[in-house]
Image (cartoon, helix red, strand yellow):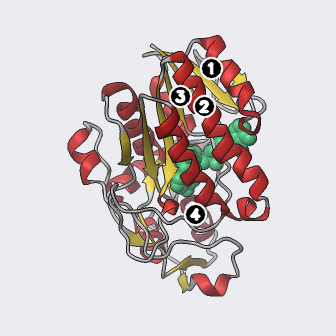
Amino acid sequence: MKVAVTGANGLLGGEAVDLLLGRHEVLALGRGPSRLPPGPFTWADADLGDGRSVARALADFGAQAVLHAGAMTDVDACERDPEAAWRVNASGTEQVARACRELRARLVAVSTDYVFDGRAGPYREDDLPNPRGAYARTKRVGEEAALLLAPDSAVARVAVVYSGRPGAKGTFATQIVEKLSRGEPVRAFEDQFVSPTLARNGAAMALELLLGTDYRGVLHVSGATVLDRVEFARRLAERFGLRGDVVPVRTADAGLLAPRPLRGGLLVERASSLLREKPLAVDAALDRFFEEWSRRPGGKGS
Ligand SMILES: NC(=O)c1ccc[n+]([C@@H]2O[C@H](COP(=O)([O-])OP(=O)(O)OC[C@H]3O[C@@H](n4cnc5c(N)ncnc54)[C@H](OP(=O)(O)O)[C@@H]3O)[C@@H](O)[C@H]2O)c1
């Protein structure tokens, strides 16, 4: 099958490309050159901010299924530049959805727990979104664009994505390991409840949703455990055998530009019963993260 992945240089998209290789014909899309290890895929440099270039690349390839994982994911940058956030997250997703309709391709658009306001999480798929801030609002619009414009589509929501894969971008999880390894204390929000998602697990679930089901609508494909960031940092430290201080801080004291959902997190019962690839509980995910990290040059963790 001809499968395309947007955001292929990203945490989730990179894992998706890796999972597809050797099984399908793969078009990987990103802005600028590929940062993926070389492999049997075609690369397209296409800017989601000019969605037509992405649509053209999908059409030239003749995509039959599309995992749309590209997005402007820096929440505060979105807040500073809502115009850019709209172009990439809302209009970019609209163009991807329109292209899928033209091509009669199945679409899974990746989205976020940030579509909820975080007053009463964790949330089920049927709970009513109430996005706060430019990132959240543009992602929510992207969800509607995907579901409305592409007849065969689903939205896969994840949260706090992390990966230990060599070359993957830094995240909260990798910073915790790096700082504690250097003997530095780490700060973590004690009042943000989240469902951390190991990128490979989230990507595998999103791909199964795309290629192995005809499910339409929203599906939560995050990790299975909801916990606050202090607890997540402590579990990470424990798994890596790292000592050191995890200092609890409050979100309101951090002076962040964009609002953060506090009582967030996603409930994943539906994915657990629908998919063969199951949402991982945090300790199982951290075991895999540790293995990924151990494959990094000099990355033994302790
Ligand atoms: N990361 C999280 O914690 C998180 C949480 C909840 C939901 N999500 C959602 O999960 C999906 C995957 O994100 P991720 O975790 O893999 O984050 P990521 O690593 O930031 O990946 C996003 C990718 O999109 C690419 N991109 C950004 N602007 C673009 C543009 N104008 N044109 C083309 N590509 C562009 C980025 O390119 P560069 O690599 O060149 O920057 C990056 O490779 C997104 O839909 C995101 O909203 C992520």
**Residue 297: x and y, percent?**
61, 44
Q: CA distance from mark 1 to mark 2?
A: 8 Å
* Residue at the spot of label 1: 58
Can you say which quadrant of the picture contains the N terminus?
Answer: top left
Q: CA distance from mark 4 to mark 1?
A: 33 Å
Return the disc, 1 or 2, that comes first in the chain's sequence.
1
Q: Amino acid at mark 1?
A: Leu
Q: Are there few (<14), some (14-19), or many (20+) residues within 10 Å of tag 4?
A: some
Residue 300 visible, this angle? no
Q: Amino acid at mark 4?
A: Phe
* Residue at the spot of label 3: 17
- Using the image as rendered, state which of residue 109 and residue 301 is in the foreground: 109
Return the disc, 2 or 4, that comes first in the chain's sequence.
2
Q: CA distance from mark 2 to mark 3?
A: 18 Å
State whether residue 294 is above or below residue 149: below
Q: CA distance from mark 4 to mark 3?
A: 23 Å
* Residue at the spot of label 2: 96
The label number, if any, that marks residue 172 in the structure image: 4
Return the disc, 4 or 3, that comes first in the chain's sequence.
3
Q: Quadrant of residue 266?
A: bottom left
Q: Amino acid at mark 2?
A: Val
Q: Amino acid at mark 3?
A: Val
**Residue 271: x and y, percent?**
29, 46
